[in-house]
Image (tube, rainbow, N blue to C red):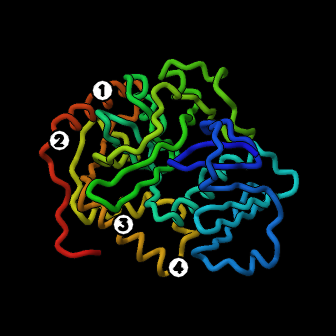
Amino acid sequence: MYTYSAYNLCIHSEIPFPELVSEDTAQLPDVVISLRKITDSEAESADGEDRILGLIEDPSRVCRFLAEFGSKIIVEPAPGMENDVLRPYILGPMFAVLLRQRGLLILHASSVAINDEAIAFLGHSGWGKSTLASAFYNQGYSLLTDDLMAIQVEGRHPITFPGYPYVRLLPDSAASLGYDFKSLIPINSLVPKRNNSLMRGFPQKPFPLKRLYVLENVARSQNEIESLQLQESLVELIRHSRVMNILTTKDFISSHLRQCSELLRKVPVYRLKRQHSLAALPNIVQLVEEDVTKSANVQPHTLKTAV
């Protein structure tokens, strides 16, 4: 059994995860990951909430998983499915379901720490979240999450938990950031990206969430930050939430809307309009740095009624 930490959890796993931070501890696990067949009785007991049965469709194969009570993931791979193909699915949608069971809001976002606070970049795959987070890392900031961001909304200040110190980069992004793509870690033969370790300064504590930037998938002639109105912000949070196609019960949908509304009471949301040029990354980093610095007196949206 392998022992890791991620998202402020102690994880015991039957399969190795090079992406995760290894732990040498006798601590009881918060999460156990097992690799075996899901029994008929286990599948029949799935209720869509405490026990969630999900399917992952690899190009020509189907992998089943069962997430239970936010503390267990049973993975039933398709015949011949290798661990390097399984790992991204476990760390992506399967873990998103489990974290959601634990009451966290899960966004499709990468995040970094600036002045002991977290800022996040929301966007779909291929929109440049990892590349932008890497650009901040190259300027001395710590990576917190790549792709999957878990937020505890309750409390005076929402907090986010560090995931694992890796980002996925394409060859052109790696080159623009000063990395030799061939020296990066392959994920598997189905993924054109490679893993890049951003271990320096990787934290082991949660950070208060300062602000959210929604990335545009439209090329602009200049870089600009635009404040979003309440309704726009809510739409973007829902749009960039993870595994909503799996968490379809009335209770999950209702709690998700409440969490999004609560987050908007405390954290401002902006749209980051940018040039789609890797050469523009330093200017984008500087723009966000300046925006974070001047934002001390900016208040998040005030909601008159709950959603």
Q: Earlier in the sequence, mark 2 or mark 1?
A: 1
Q: Nearer the viewer, residue 121 or 70?
A: 70
What residue is shown with label 3? Answer: 259
Q: CA distance from mark 3 to mark 2?
A: 23 Å
Q: Quadrant of the image for the C terminus?
A: bottom left
Q: Which mark is residue 240?
A: none
Q: CA distance from mark 3 to mark 4?
A: 16 Å
Position of residue 202 relative to residue 104, above or below, is above
What residue is shown with label 2? Answer: 295
Residue density around tag 1, few if under 14, some if 14–19, many if 20 or more, within 10 Å: some
Q: Earlier in the sequence, mark 1 or mark 4?
A: 4
Residue at screen point 79% across, 61% down: 76
Q: Is residue 187 left or right of residue 119?
A: right
Residue at screen point 46% across, 65% down: 103
How many numbered discs, if any?
A: 4
What residue is shown with label 4? Answer: 249
Point out residue 85 in the picture as x, y percentages from the top left corner. Answer: 74, 46
Viewer-side label of 2, 1: 2
Q: CA distance from mark 2 to mark 4?
A: 38 Å
Residue at screen point 76% across, 49% down: 14
Q: Quadrant of residue 22 in the image?
A: top right
What residue is shown with label 1? Answer: 283
Residue density around tag 4, few if under 14, some if 14–19, many if 20 or more, within 10 Å: few
Q: Earlier in the sequence, mark 2 or mark 4?
A: 4
Viewer-side label of 1, 3: 3
Can residue 137 be seen from the camera position used here?
yes
Viewer-side label of 1, 4: 4
Q: Nearer the viewer, residue 306 or 61?
A: 306
Residue at screen point 27% across, 61% down: 264
Q: Earlier in the sequence, mark 1 or mark 3?
A: 3
Q: CA distance from mark 1 to mark 4?
A: 43 Å
